[in-house]
Image (tube, rainbow, N blue to C red):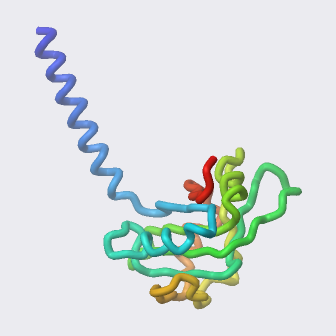
């Protein structure tokens, strides 16, 4: 009887894992909100804005168009940098990358309380600067701005060793 119970629990656990994994791929919203190295800026943009990417194929870039806000203290200045934002046609999924110095990016990512991305509201509807070669910018939609502004960073790409 113990053997049969063990098999049943194992099969049930496997089913839960499989079905929980299916729901993970149906996520919408903010998938990737990175702050980090300017050296990886273009490579990540090209990867995010591709047909096989979950981010989408619409892009907006801006030179010094956003800032990383370190919420540990009001005396820490905002870190402005170039930004790209990629979203899908339904405007429900978004990925972004704020290019700052690698060390600053690591500080913002590991800060407690979490650091956030700040985009001026004046950027809504503005044309992009075309910072990534081979990609054509589109105006920034208000829905994408709403998903992304004041969001916590969830990645910190770096081109230097820790």
Q: Indicate the quadrant containing the N terminus: top left, top right, bottom left or bottom right.
A: top left
- The residue shown at (30%, 46%) is 21
Q: Residue furthest top?
A: 1
Q: Quadrant of residue 98?
A: bottom right
For the residue pair 22 and 56, the one nearer the viewer reads as 56
- The residue shown at (88%, 56%) is 75
In the displayed structure image, the side of residue 139 where residue 89 appears, left or right: left
Q: Position of residue 134 (x, y in %)?
A: 45, 87
Look at the picture and state if 139 lies above or below 101.
below
Q: Position of residue 106 (x, y in %)?
A: 66, 53
- The residue shown at (15%, 9%) is 2
Q: Position of residue 23 (x, y in %)?
A: 32, 51
Look at the picture and state if 99 lies above or below 106.
below
In the displayed structure image, the side of residue 20 where residue 100 appears, left or right: right
Q: Quadrant of residue 52?
A: bottom left
Q: Position of residue 143 (x, y in %)?
A: 53, 75
Look at the picture and state if 108 lies above or below 121.
above
Q: Residue furthest right?
A: 75
In the displayed structure image, the side of residue 152 where residue 29 appears, left or right: left
In this rendering, the count of numbered labels is 0
- The residue shown at (71%, 52%) is 107
Q: Quadrant of residue 145?
A: bottom right
In the displayed structure image, the side of residue 55 where residue 42 appears, left or right: right
């Amino acid at each position: 009887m113990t053997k049969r119970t063990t098999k049943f629990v194992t099969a049930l656990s496997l089913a839960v894992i499989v079905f929980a994994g299916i729901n993970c791929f149906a996520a919408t919203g903010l998938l990737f909100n990175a702050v980090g190295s300017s050296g990886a800026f273009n490579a990540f943009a090209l990867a995010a804005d591709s047909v096989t990417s979950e981010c989408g194929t619409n892009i907006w870039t801006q030179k010094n168009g956003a800032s990383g806000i370190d919420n540990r203290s009001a005396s820490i200045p905002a870190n402005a940098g170039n930004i790209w934002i990629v979203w899908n046609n339904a405007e429900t999924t978004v990925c972004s990358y704020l290019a700052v110095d690698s060390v600053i990016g690591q500080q913002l990512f590991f800060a407690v309380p979490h650091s956030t991305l700040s985009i001026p509201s004046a950027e809504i509807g503005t044309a992009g600067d075309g910072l990534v070669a081979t990609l054509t910018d589109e105006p920034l939609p208000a829905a994408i701005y709403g998903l992304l502004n004041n969001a916590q960073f969830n990645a910190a790409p770096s081109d230097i060793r820790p």
